[in-house]
Amino acid sequence: MALTPRLDLRQTQSLVMTPQLQQAIKLLQLSSVELTAFIEEELEINPMLEREEPEAPDADTRDMADTDAADASGDGDGADTGEMPDDGESFDMATAESVSGGEDSALDINESEWSDDGPTETPYDGLSATSLGSGIGSRDPFDSEGDFESTLGESQTLREHLVEQLLVEIGDQVDRIIGITLIDTLDEAGWLTEPLHTIAANLDCPVERVETVLARLQRFEPAGLFARDLRECLALQLGDRNRLDPAMEALLDNLDLLARHDRAGLMKACGVDDEDLADMVAEIRALDPKPGLAFQNEVTQTIAPDILMRPHPDGGWIVELNPETLPRVLVNNDYYARVRKEAREKDDREYINACFQSASWLVKSLHQRATTILKVAQEIVRQQDAFFRKGIAHMKPLVLRDIAEEIEMHESTVSRVTTNKYMHTPRGLFELKYFFSAAIGSVDGSAAHSAEAVRFRIKALIDDESPAKILSDDRIVEILNGEGIDIARRTVAKYRESMKIPSSVQRRRQKNLKI
């Protein structure tokens, strides 16, 4: 066979991921917060996009909008044709469709952290108050000047709370420097994170002086701060309540026995009877092992649901997109026509056309994203109708393939849709992933049971057990088999551990000893 160069023609087919398709896939898996951030970026870089500010409708307009939405509720498949939406038409879709159901229907104002004219530099082995850097926050704790208005409405941090007490309780400048250093070594729970000898070496001062300052700081409010271990944290709080007697000290010295619920060992170590031991344990439980967490100022992020669900007056369910989480953007056709007419250079025309095309594809992608999310949510509601009507015990086993086959989409599309998307239902707020659960076989070969429903049943059995009759994992298996659920012992143990439920031996100790 001769080895010579030649030309061949071949015809092949391949899937090409165009930039538009990549953008549509990317938008599909974004959460509402991430989508809002993405839209803001596009509005900044694309002059052909503009934000549509919603107007408050009057009563007549609202009634007309409700009528139009009811008339359009049967046209939920129109977006699947892939047609480009009309230019200039904004994306603001909250289609509502009913899904057929079953047969059952002291303001804190920190004016200043220093009330005198300001500290003077008092050298102590090369250290001064003004040379000490702050590990938390950039403001000098000894600086009396500051913006008063900036402190209005601010939550006080743990460091600020302790510095205020430090400036009042400790007057010596060197001890204040040591105190600030100790405050900066606290973790978020209020415990010291460095040994005292290390702190003393860094400050080049005697360890005894650091211990003296620490003893004064440990009397600060709230009690329990500046502890080096759990025993010291609890002891500081009991001492503040004047409850640190010899029996309580003995109990703190034997926290390992308390963890093992060894009643006999604790009574012997503390020299008390059964009733006194129960009171002492109740006091220990009332203490806070992490007192510093009370000053955490992290704002809880509220989850905005992407889908709203409510019962239909005539039966079934109404599923609609949340209009508050939908971005409202449109293509500015007037601006496009004006700048295109005035463009003379080829590069300018290409840039204008590219921006217009990108804006049009973005609006279309948002429309398709909303339609896909709504279709998936409606199918989930239809499949899990028994859960919404009767509770978690009636949840149906469900996988991505079941939804994908019903709505004629790929499993990967359903997976992207259900990621970081939430639905508000009459039973609470759930992530769409929650409704997908593995199947556990039935003893008689009938319909399978949802793993989530089985997990709930296991928890209910353990919650209802009596101290005299603790259920072992084997006994739980027998009960579930009697109810028609084919489950192995290791599966019961796995579900129990995932719910952080202790073993039968530990539960027997807890319920019988009441500790």
Image: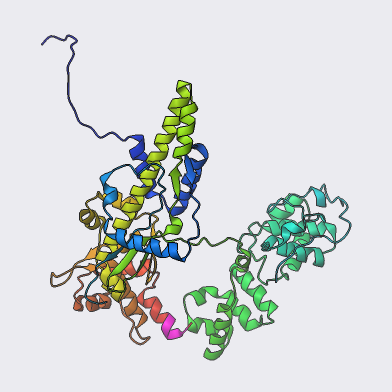
398 left or right of 341 in image? left
Q: Is residue 78 above or below residue 246?
A: above
Residue 385: percent from left, percent from top: 27, 69
Give the total number of marks visible in the rendering.
0
Residue 234: percent from left, percent from top: 62, 73
364 left or right of 103 in image? right
Q: Main secondary structure of the magenta part?
A: helix
Residue 13 on the magenta span: no
Q: Quadrant of residue 159?
A: bottom right
The residues colored magenta run 510-514
Q: Is residue 197 above or below residue 233?
A: above
Query: Colour scheme in the image?
Result: rainbow
442 left or right of 109 in image? left
Most foreground residue, 386 or 210: 386
* Identity of the residue furthest to the left in this view: 1
| Residue at left offset 60%, top offset 79% | 250
Residue 27: percent from left, percent from top: 39, 46
Most foreground residue, 293 or 237: 293
Most foreground residue, 114 or 320: 320
Residue 48 shows up from this direction: no
| Residue at left offset 36%, top offset 35% | 19
Q: Is residue 139 above or below residue 65?
A: above
Q: Quadrant of the N terminus?
A: top left
| Residue at left offset 26%, top offset 59% | 74
Residue 513 on the magenta span: yes
Residue 304 shows up from this direction: yes
Most foreground residue, 116 or 231: 116
